[in-house]
Image (spheres, rainbow, N blue to C red):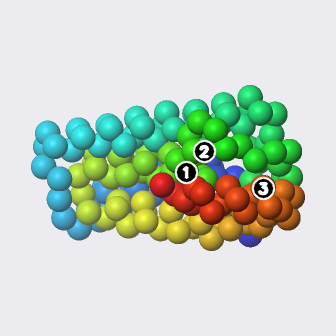
Amino acid sequence: MNHRILPPTYLLMAMLVIVLLHILAPLAYIVRMPWNLLGLLPLGLGLIVTAVADRAFKQRGTTVHPFKEPTQVVTNGVFRFSRNPMYLGFVLVLLGMAILLRSLSPFAIVGGFAIWMDIGFIRVEERILAATFGDEWVRYKRRIRKWV
């Protein structure tokens, strides 16, 4: 894994691929207009959740960088509902885009992105957190689900 490519870059790449798939291989249009505008809800919620999670890291003085050692476990705010609200926010943004575009093929990227974030980042981060915080991390992990 190339640790220089961070999750926001993968998000931008996934957004580009979603648009390209929609243009080049839409497969089928599964959301009718104006119902596609409901995609603004997960898109907006995703942006908000990501921003709030980012701010929580900064307020607590710990890193948002996936491969740097954190200084503390953030458990308040959006972290009371998800251990990974930033990744959840990214997935919601992609889901919103897929709904807005209306075609079937972008939805595959949404699922693939979530799997990639889990395998490529979340599992690594959770190993770092377990090694750094031990029982504190284990208690939090038992209480809060990975996604929602």
Q: Where residue 43 sits in the image (x, y, percent)? A: 39, 40
Numbered disc in front, either 3 or 1 = 3
Coordinates of residue 57 in the picture (x, y in percent): 72, 37
Q: Element under label 2?
A: helix
Point out which mark residue 136 bears.
Answer: 3
Q: SS for tag 3?
A: helix
Q: Residues within 10 Å of mark 2 (few under 14, many from 20)?
A: many
Task: State the residue in front, 16 or 116.
Answer: 116
Task: Name the amino acid type tagged 2.
Answer: Phe
Q: Mark 2 = which residue?
A: 79
Can you tell which quarter of the image residue 60 is in?
A: top right
Q: Can you say which quadrant of the picture contains the N terminus?
A: bottom right
Q: Nearer the viewer, residue 16 or 66?
A: 66
Q: Mark 2 vs mark 3: give the one in front.
A: 3
Estimate the spatial distance between the alpha carbons at disc 2 and disc 1, rounded to whole Å: 5 Å
Query: Which quadrant of the view contains residue 139?
Result: bottom right
Q: Label 3 near label 2: C-beta < 8 Å?
A: no
Q: Badge 1 is on which residue?
A: 82
On screen, residue 42 above or below 11: above
